[in-house]
Amino acid sequence: MKRWLWTAVMAASMMCGTAVAAPADGVDGTAAQIVTLAGDHRLVVLGEYHGTAETPLLVADLMERYSRDNVPVRLGLELPMSENVALARYLRSNGDAAARQALRTSPFWRVKNDQHDGRRSRDMLALIEALRALRAQGRDVGVAGYDVETGSAGGSDIRDAAMATHLRQQFNALPAPARMLVLTGNVHAMRSPPSDAPPEFQRPMSAYLLDLPLYSVRLEALRGHFWACISPCRALKLADQPPREPIVSTDADRSYDVVVWMPSLSVGTLTDR
């Protein structure tokens, strides 16, 4: 792992008073694949399995790569927009104990025990710290949430439409050279609805943004586990796969522009013990 990223991860682990294990091999290789495949697309949407340790490391790696040569890069996280003031304040801070504590005092980060859906973890906090470290080095990076508020009324289609509206506003506010990365659940990242979608689910989030320079990436893994809240919240195992190359699609009704396989995924660490 890159020295700057490992330093940032270790610093972020102090937010919760625990060490962070070294990541699985292959994060660098997957990041390089995505940069090559996405090319000049300025809106790169990453569809993940929530609640892993490796995906936040991958996103931090991508942010470092894309922000080289003083190129502005913004990261959209599937967090409520009410978190944006705290996120911006943390990126401007020195990352000390008071700043770390202030970042995770909102109700979103204070979910107890196992009742979370994987978007809130020490690994996600480490990603935010990695961005603060990049900014402290002079990189033009930022982060913002684009989700609706937790507990908002409405079904999944209403939520996806609202998230797309928020992302469109954030993307349109960027200067022309800037790039935006978006980390989201793998269904939200789809360009077209899944075949088994219920009738009331009209379009996933990315399907509302196809007029933008969007490139949709499905993040898969050859083996491992992720965290899901499927009665009850628990770790779920991925089916083992042989080594695979990325699958690129250009079909008009494609679900994703590309599917890439990370070597392995492991469950992230809860923010609350």
Image: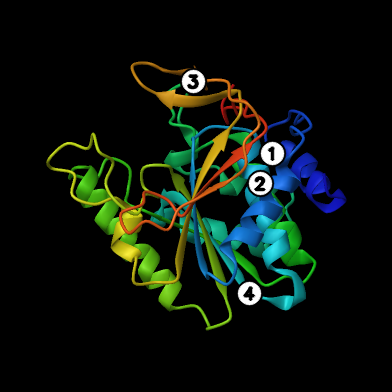
Alpha carbon distance from label 4 to label 3: 37 Å
Can residue 207 be seen in this snapshot?
yes
Alpha carbon distance from label 1 to label 2: 20 Å
Horizontal arrangement in the rendering, residue 266 relative to residue 182 (left or right): right
Of residues 60 and 131, which is closer to you in this image?
A: 60
Closer to the chain start, of discs 2 and 4, is: 2
Alpha carbon distance from label 2 to label 4: 18 Å
| Residue found 60% across the figure and 59% down from its top | 37
Alpha carbon distance from label 3 to label 1: 17 Å
Task: Say which quarter of the image contains residue 178.
Answer: bottom right
Identify the amino acid type marked 4.
Answer: Pro
> Residue 217, position in %: x, y?
50, 51
Label 2 with label 4: CB-CB less than 8 Å: no
The residue that label 2 is drawn on is 58
Closer to the chain start, of discs 1 and 2, is: 1
From the viewer's perspective, is the residue at label 2 or at label 4 nearer?
2
Q: Which mark is residue 72?
A: 4
Q: Secondary structure at mark 1?
A: loop
Q: State which quarter of the image contains the C terminus.
A: top right
| Residue found 66% across the figure and 65% down from its top | 92
The residue that label 3 is drawn on is 113
